[in-house]
Amino acid sequence: MKAALNNTTIASSWLSSMLSPILQAVRRLWPWAPVSNTKTPTIVIHGGAGTILKAKMTDQEEQRLREGLSRATMAGYTVLQKGGSALDAVEAAVRSLEDNPLFNAGKGAVFNIDGVNQLEASIMNGNTGSAGAATLLTVVKNPIALARKVMESGRHVFMCGPGAESYAKDQGLDIVDSSYFWTKHRWEQHERGFFTANTVELLAGECSDSGLAERSDKNGDYSHFPMGTVGAVAIDAWGNLAAATSTGGMSNKWNGRIGDTPIIGAGTWADANVAISGTGTGEYFIRLGTSRYIASRVGLLKEKSGVASAAAITEMKKMGGDGGVICIDSSGNFWMTFCSDGMYRGYCSSQSNHIPVVAIFKDEKISSGDNHVVV
């Protein structure tokens, strides 16, 4: 009997050694080959972070924002439910937010100092390490779709301006007139930025009113404007991770300013261990390399992703920045970590009975991974 068991073990070991290089070759040719069939598909999204106070928001505005978050979350989760990839899921979720004028990305993007909408986005595949990004866009309807096309080209990672837009057209992406991005509330925000005592504050952060009625008192109180960027992270049934981020950037930013959103390692990162998308004061995300900083702590220090996220946000806050990140690891654990008064956020998985769960304010706790950091 012992000899039979030994022979079986030897045969199994031999078969495994023979199949291993074959499976690795298949993996290279077919990146979405299953890593594991035991993972629970999960998507997490954000729609921006900042000073978000319920007192500054009408019930109708709050309802519209929550509905927008739910639609985006479900757009991504539907992809996962159908057996789609994490990469497809994060793109679908971000596209939904880009098409919603309430959020500072795509249709709802803010204006720069010259009254122009300049958009940017990035996406990263944690399974292959491939990434794509685009910035200084003015006519590409969905920047996240262009970021993915750049990634899939296999030649470049980052494109900008007219060259990127020409490539988008060649790839058959939707090209629109720049007037498509014009919205009344964003234009009023742009104009008010020139005539209030808070102009400097408006220029200091990626301000986004997320479609809220732009009310202000006689002293120019813009404290209810949240910071704006949208993003998504996901894990699919095979255990693959992906992240995507998109934004219109900072209200009244200088012409040509590039934020953290299209910079791989700053606003977006995904590898075999973790996927991250950030929102907040872009300059600080760039200086800290926030998303890669989190991934490095997880990969090198073997920290839990929630601990690493909290450490990164704490570090950024001490430097003078503000905002948050969403993060998901290879086990499907996720965190929504922020140091601001609120963050538009949501998730969907079997944990939520396959129904999107969303939140806005810091005192809402929608999962064990909902983490408001006090620095």
Image (cartoon, rainbow, N blue to C red):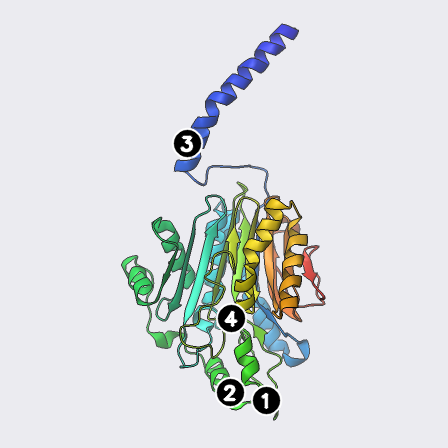
* Residue 174 appears in the rendering: yes
Q: Are marks 1 and 2 in contact (CB under 8 Å)?
A: yes
Counting residues from the N terminus, which is met first, the one under dot 2 or under dot 4? 4
**On the image, numbered disc 3 is attached to which residue?**
25
**On the image, numbered disc 1 is attached to which residue?**
220
Looking at the image, residue 41 sits to the left or right of residue 247; the answer is right
Which one is closest to the eye, mark 4 or mark 1?
Answer: 1
Q: x, y (%) of residue 130?
A: 43, 48
- CA gap, disc 4 to disc 3? 42 Å
Counting residues from the N terminus, which is met first, the one under dot 3 or under dot 2? 3
The amino acid type found where label 3 is placed reads: Ala
- CA gap, disc 3 to disc 2? 58 Å
Q: Are marks 4 and 1 in contact (CB under 8 Å)?
A: no
- CA gap, disc 1 to disc 2? 9 Å
**On the image, numbered disc 2 is attached to which residue?**
192
Looking at the image, residue 58 sits to the left or right of residue 114; the answer is right
**On the image, numbered disc 4 is attached to which residue?**
103
